[in-house]
């Protein structure tokens, strides 16, 4: 994963305006159970042999498993923001931040 961020600031007296840009990219190996096909297991609880239970149609001993598949997921993100800050006195300032384009 990498992240690039930058901000430009303009200050005039007690007022500060800023605009910024964040650019991020990430990739990860993930495991998912979709769209894998289910598997059916027979343990041989009735006849002692799994294949014999399957051929006899003994449904009570089946278990459905969904195998996991590994895939590479990638995601990119571009965000922009603006910030407005005003200093009311030396100890108190008010600021607002919002995404650009909204």
Image (cartoon, rainbow, N blue to C red):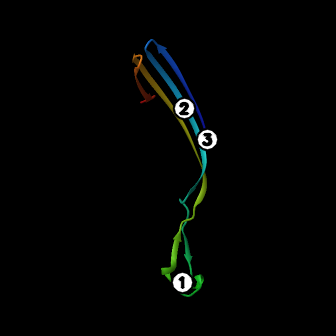
Asked if the residue under mark 2 is in contact with the one under mark 1, i.e. CB atoms within 8 Å, the reply is: no
- Residue at x 55%, y 73% (from the top left corner): 40
Q: Pointer 1 and pointer 3: residues touching (CB < 8 Å)?
A: no
In the rendered view, would you say 32 is above or below 89? below
In the rendered structure, the answer to whether residue 60 lies left or right of residue 24 reads left
**Near-viewer residue (97 or 50):** 97
The answer for how far apart the CA atoms under marks 3 and 2 are is 13 Å
Crowdedness near tag 3: few (<14), some (14–19) or many (≥20) residues, C-alpha within 10 Å? few
Q: Measure the alpha-carbon separation of dots 1 and 3.
A: 49 Å
Please tell me how many numbered marks the rendered image carries.
3
Name the element at disc 2.
strand
**From the viewer's perspective, is 11 left or right of 3?**
left
Callouts 3 and 2 close, C-beta under 8 Å? no
Where is residue 89? Give x, y as percent: 39, 16
Inter-mark Cα distance, 1 to 2: 59 Å
**Residue 2 x/y as whole percent:** 61, 38
Where disc 3 sits, the SS reads loop
Can you identify the residue that label 3 sits on? 1
Q: Quadrant of the N terminus?
A: top right
Q: Secondary structure at mark 1?
A: loop
Q: Find the residue positioned furthest to the top.
A: 13
Question: What crowding class fits label 1: few (fewer than 14 Cα within 10 Å), some (14-19), or many (20 or more)?
Answer: some
Disc sitting over residue 45 in the figure: 1
Q: Residue at x 46, y 18 (%)?
A: 16
Residue at 59% over, 85% down: 49
Q: Residue at 46% of width from left, 19% of height from top?
A: 17
Image spot of residue 6 (x, y percent): 56, 27
Where's residue 55, x and y in %? 56, 84
Depicted 2 relative to depicted 12: above or below: below
Q: Which residue is mark 2?
A: 22
């Amino acid at each position: 994963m990498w992240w690039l961020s930058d901000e430009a600031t303009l200050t005039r007296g007690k007022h500060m305006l800023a605009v910024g840009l964040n650019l991020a990219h990430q990739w990860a190996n993930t495991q998912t159970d979709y769209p894998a096909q289910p598997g059916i297991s027979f343990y041989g609880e009735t006849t002692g042999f799994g294949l014999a239970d399957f051929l006899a149609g003994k449904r009570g001993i089946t278990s459905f498993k969904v195998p996991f598949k590994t895939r590479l997921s990638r995601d990119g993100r571009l965000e922009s923001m603006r910030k407005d800050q005003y200093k009311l006195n030396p100890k108190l300032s008010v600021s607002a931040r919002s995404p650009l384009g909204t």
